[in-house]
Image (cartoon, rainbow, N blue to C red):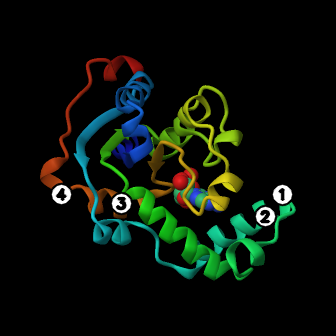
Amino acid sequence: MASNLKSERTLLLVKPDGVKRGLIGEVILRMEQRGLKVIALKMVQPTVEHIEGFLPKSDKWLERMGNKTLGTYEQYKMDPIKELGTKDPLKIGKMIKKWLVGFWLSGPVVAMVISGIHAIDMVRKIVGNTIPAKAEMGTIRGDYSVDSPILANIGKRAIHNVIHASGDIEEATHETEHWFSPEEIHDYKRAEEDIMF
Ligand code: ADP
């Protein structure tokens, strides 16, 4: 149990915007400086099938995405029917999913598996809020992204926010298996492990 706690695993992807902006090194630096360990790393040009298998499929997730978008439209006093042709959260969620697929296919992605104490939560914290304006300074998204949901929605595209990181243990397990085979994951001991924890 104790050894598992020290080596929780999570999947981190540098999205096509992050790769094209030369942020691969910065992302790795921020993981390593926190005491987290990169145990798998590769660059991939994803296929449609790969991304469709990766993105959640449940209606619950699609509805959550749709409702988030409806909230943005309400905030900016814009009419979803005029902009998107519907106010059904599920239908809007399906549209966002299509935009997301397009974004993921727009260039190579750097995939890594990160291991460490509470790696899932730690990585999410270092990455910051999904919406760049809400992401705290000092987080990767807070320091390196400026996109806005309403701008993304008007442009019928996904929010460009540099990183994807798994949200919980189930996601981390499924996503790690989706992007890496067991042979591609390498464990090792970092020199400062005995001192840091
Ligand atoms: P996270 O990536 O922080 O886990 P979500 O699972 O809510 O966030 O969303 C997945 C990705 O979908 C986001 O990182 C972002 O690129 C994109 N996205 C989220 N909400 C919207 C939206 N309202 N419009 C367009 N793209 C969105």
Of callouts 3 and 4, which one flags the residue occurring earlier in the amino acid sequence?
3
Q: Is residue 99 visible?
A: yes
Closer-to-camera residue (189/127):
127
Q: Which residue is mark 4?
A: 181
Looking at the rendered image, the disc whose residue lies closer to the viewer, 1 or 3, is: 1
> Residue 134 location, x and y as percent?
71, 41
Q: Regarding mark 4 in the picture, which secondary structure is present there?
A: loop
The residue lying at 48 percent from left, 62 percent from top is: 100
Q: Pointer 2: residues within 10 angstroms few (<14), some, or many (20+)? A: some
Mark before the other along the chain sequence, 3 or 2? 2
Question: Separation of disc 2 and disc 1 at Cα?
Answer: 5 Å
Residue 103: image quadrant is bottom left
The residue type indicated by label 2 comes to Tyr
Q: Amino acid at mark 1?
A: Tyr
Amino acid on which the number 3 mark rests in the picture: Glu
Q: Which mark is residue 144?
A: none
* Ligand 1 quadrant assignment: bottom right
Q: Which residue is mark 1?
A: 76
